[in-house]
Image (cartoon, grey):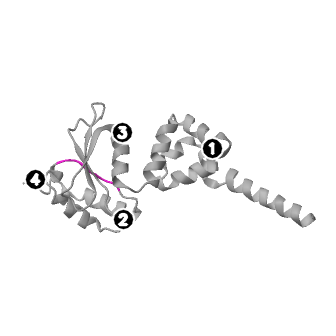
Amino acid sequence: MIYVILFLGISILIFILTYFFHPLAIKLNRTPEYIFSLPLNQLPNIRRLLGRGRRLKKLLSANSIPESVWQQAVSFYENKEPRFRCELIAKRIGKACDFIEESRIPLFRLRPGEKFVLGIDHCYLAFPPGDMQPYAIINLLEQVRDVAFCPCLIFSLNEKQQIELRQISLESSNFFRNSG
């Protein structure tokens, strides 16, 4: 009997330590704005760690993040379907998101709404597979009419691919690559 009580006590203690004293939970409780610097893949962990005891609502409130926006961000990470992701982005900043069929990677044309700060007529959203080489992505995008002359946002959940694409985007040889 004593072993059962001891086992239950240790189990409860481990549960409490896991949820309430997790390093990420402690950091977010001390500095709520830290949520903005976390990678997208941490959102489900935050939901799991802070979902109990209203700590998640307190964190969202401290950062003026509506709960609906939080749910959209988590859905954006969890649902890997490019059309779904594009529609979520269109709900936030655009009027419509149209699929470009001539592309060999998932590519969409987004028409931002009037409130969009950049004042552009349209831009492109690309969702390449995580195992595709960055230069292959760029080359495929360049083959699609009009993409080389418009802003194109490439969404990747592969961190290595993100870093390589960023480096490519900063190379001066890629500026106005197909413009003349």
Residue position marked by numbered label 3 in the rendering: 91
Mark sitting earlier along the chain (4/2): 2
Q: Residue at x 64, y 49 (%)?
A: 26
Question: Who is closer to the viewer here, 7 or 20?
Answer: 7
Mark sitting earlier along the chain (2/1): 1
Q: Amino acid at mark 1?
A: Asn
User: Dot 2 lies on which element?
Assistant: loop
**Marks 3 & 2, CB-CB < 8 Å contact:** no
Residue 65 in the image: above or below residue 80: above
Q: Amino acid at mark 4?
A: Ser
Residue position marked by numbered label 2 in the rendering: 130
User: Dot 1 lies on which element?
Assistant: helix
Residue at mark 3 to residue at mark 1: CA–CA distance:
30 Å
* Left or right: 49 in relation to 76: right
Q: Amino acid at mark 3?
A: Lys
Residue at mark 1 to residue at mark 4: CA–CA distance:
49 Å
Q: Residue at x 53, y 41 (%)?
A: 33
Placement of the C terminus among the 4 image quadrants? bottom left
Residue at mark 2 to residue at mark 1: CA–CA distance:
33 Å
Mark sitting earlier along the chain (1/4): 1
* Left or right: 124 in relation to 61: left
Residue 99 covered by magenta stretch: no
Mark sitting earlier along the chain (4/3): 3
Mark sitting earlier along the chain (3/1): 1
* Left or right: 165 in relation to 157: left
Q: Amino acid at mark 2?
A: Gly
Residue 53 in the image: above or below residue 41: above
Q: Residue at x 30, y 31 (%)?
A: 115
Residue position marked by numbered label 1 in the rendering: 29
Placement of the N terminus among the 4 image quadrants? bottom right
What residue occupies the far top of the structure in this picture? 114
Question: Who is closer to the viewer here, 167 or 113?
Answer: 113
